[in-house]
C-alpha cells in the first residue's frame, strides 16, 4: 500500500519543507482540520472589528497586572483562617497542592490565549472547541463566582475597617463605601482602568516585598526582643489540626486565594499585542505562584501560632497574620 505523503494534503501556511518531509498521515495527524496562520489572523481581524473590548493594555501594563493583580484578601486575611482551622502542616500542603494545579492550568490557558487572543477567554474556548452548552455553564459559573467574590471582598473590607477602628465603624457604611468605590472603578474608561490596575498592582507588589523582607528579618531575630524563630509553631502546637477536615478547609481557602488566576487570559482580548505581551507575562506565573503565595505561607506558619485568638476564625477581632507577626 502506498504511504500517503503530507504533500498530498492541504498544508497550513508557514509550515517548512523540513516539517513536511518528516510528517505523514500515518502519524495520526489530522492536517485537514488545522487552521492556517492566515485564517487565525482573519479571525482576529473580525473579532477586532466586532468585539466588545478595546485593545488598550500595553505590554508593560500586562506584565505588572499579571504579577500583582491577585494579591489581595486571599493572601493577607484568608491565610489567617487557614492557619487557625488547619494548622501549619495542613496549610502548607494545601497551598502547595493548589498552587501546583493553578500553575498547570495557567500554562494551558496561556497557550490557548496566545494562539487565539479573544475577549471571551476560556468561555469562548469552550464554545469553539467543545459545545455552546459548556460555554453557557462556564459563563454562568463565572458570573456566580464573581458575585460571591464581590460580596466576600466587601465583608473582608468591613473586617479590616472594624479592626483598625476598634469595631465602631457601622457595617452599612463600610459596605456602601466599598460598593460605591467598585462601581466608580468599573465605570472608568478602558485606558484609565488599565492604568489604575497597573498602579495598584505596583503598590501591592512593593508592599508585599516589604512584608516578606520584614518577615525574614523577624524570623532571624530582628524583632524587639531579638528572638530567633526555630519552628516552635510547628513543634509546640499540633501541626495538623482537625485532621482531614482541617486540610479540606485549608484547601478551600487556598483555592479562594490562588485559584482565580484567569485574569491573564481575560487580558488577551484587551492587550495591544497579545502574542508578545502574554507570552512574556506567562513566564511570571511560576514566580507569582511560588514566591508570592508559598513564601508568604511559610513565613506565616513560622511567625504566628495557630492558636492566636486574633486570627480570623480563632476568636476575637480578626486581623491579618502579617499584622500579628509584626506586632
Image (cartoon, rainbow, N blue to C red):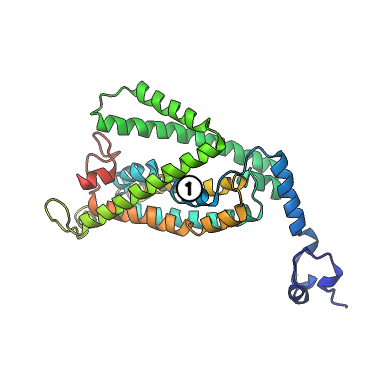
Pick the quarter of the image with the C terminus: top left
Query: In the picture provided, is 6 more to the left or to the right than 266?
Result: right
Q: How many marks?
A: 1
Residue 105, percent from left and from top: 54, 54
The quadrant of the picture occupied by the N terminus is: bottom right
Q: Is residue 305 left or right of residue 113?
A: left
Q: Which residue is mark 1?
A: 65
* Res. 103 visible in picture: yes
Relative to residue 118, is residue 231 drawn left or right? left
Asked which secondary structure carries label 1, the reply is helix
Q: Does 251 appear above or below 220?
A: above
Please tell me whether residue 312 is drawn above or below residue 205 in the rendered image.
above
Residue under the image location 60 percent in, 48 percent down: 272
- Residue 62 in percent (x, y) is at 52, 49
Give the quarter of the image for residue 174.
top left
Residue 258: x percent and y percent? 44, 48
> Residue at left 30%, top 53%?
212
Q: Residue furthest left?
A: 225
In the image, 264 versus 56, the foreground residue is: 56
Residue sitting at x 86%, y 70%: 8
Is residue 35 at least partly visible in the picture? Answer: no
Residue located farthest toward the right when viewing the structure as drawn: 1
Q: Alpha-carbon neighbours of circle 1 within 10 Å: few (<14), some, or many (≥20)?
A: many
| Residue beneath the point at 34% across and 30% down | 158
State the image quarter where residue 321 is shown. Answer: top left
Q: 27 or 163: which is nearer to us?
A: 163
Amino acid at each position: 500500500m502506498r504511504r500517503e505523503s503530507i504533500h498530498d494534503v492541504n498544508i497550513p501556511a508557514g509550515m517548512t519543507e523540513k516539517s513536511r518531509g518528516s510528517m505523514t498521515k500515518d502519524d495520526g495527524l489530522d492536517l485537514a482540520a488545522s487552521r492556517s496562520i492566515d485564517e487565525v489572523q482573519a479571525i482576529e481581524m473580525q473579532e477586532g472589528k466586532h468585539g466588545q473590548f478595546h485593545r488598550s493594555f500595553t505590554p508593560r501594563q500586562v506584565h505588572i497586572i499579571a504579577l500583582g493583580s491577585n494579591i489581595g484578601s486571599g493572601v493577607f486575611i484568608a491565610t489567617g483562617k487557614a492557619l487557625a482551622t488547619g494548622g501549619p502542616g495542613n496549610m502548607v500542603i494545601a497551598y502547595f497542592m493548589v498552587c501546583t494545579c493553578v500553575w498547570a492550568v495557567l500554562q494551558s490557558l496561556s497557550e490557548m490565549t496566545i494562539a487565539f487572543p479573544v475577549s471571551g477567554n476560556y468561555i469562548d474556548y469552550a464554545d469553539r472547541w467543545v459545545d455552546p452548552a459548556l460555554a453557557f455553564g462556564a459563563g454562568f459559573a463565572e458570573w456566580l463566582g464573581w458575585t460571591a467574590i464581590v460580596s466576600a471582598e466587601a465583608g473582608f473590607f468591613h473586617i479590616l475597617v472594624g479592626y483598625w477602628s476598634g469595631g465602631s465603624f457601622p457595617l452599612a457604611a463600610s459596605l456602601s463605601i466599598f460598593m460605591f468605590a467598585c462601581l466608580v472603578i468599573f465605570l472608568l474608561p478602558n485606558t484609565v482602568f488599565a492604568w489604575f490596575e497597573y498602579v495598584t498592582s505596583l503598590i501591592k507588589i512593593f508592599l508585599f516585598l516589604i512584608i516578606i523582607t520584614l518577615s525574614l528579618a523577624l524570623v532571624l531575630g530582628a524583632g524587639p526582643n531579638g528572638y530567633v524563630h526555630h519552628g516552635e509553631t510547628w513543634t509546640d502546637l499540633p501541626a495538623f489540626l482537625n485532621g482531614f477536615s482541617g486540610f479540606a478547609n485549608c484547601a478551600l481557602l487556598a483555592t479562594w486565594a490562588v485559584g482565580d488566576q484567569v485574569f491573564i487570559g481575560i487580558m488577551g482580548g484587551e492587550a495591544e499585542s497579545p502574542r508578545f505581551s502574554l507570552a512574556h507575562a506567562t513566564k511570571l506565573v511560576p514566580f507569582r505562584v511560588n514566591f508570592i503565595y508559598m513564601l508568604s505561607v511559610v513565613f506565616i506558619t513560622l511567625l504566628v501560632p495557630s492558636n492566636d485568638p486574633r486570627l480570623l476564625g480563632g476568636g476575637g477581632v480578626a486581623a491579618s497574620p502579617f499584622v500579628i507577626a509584626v506586632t
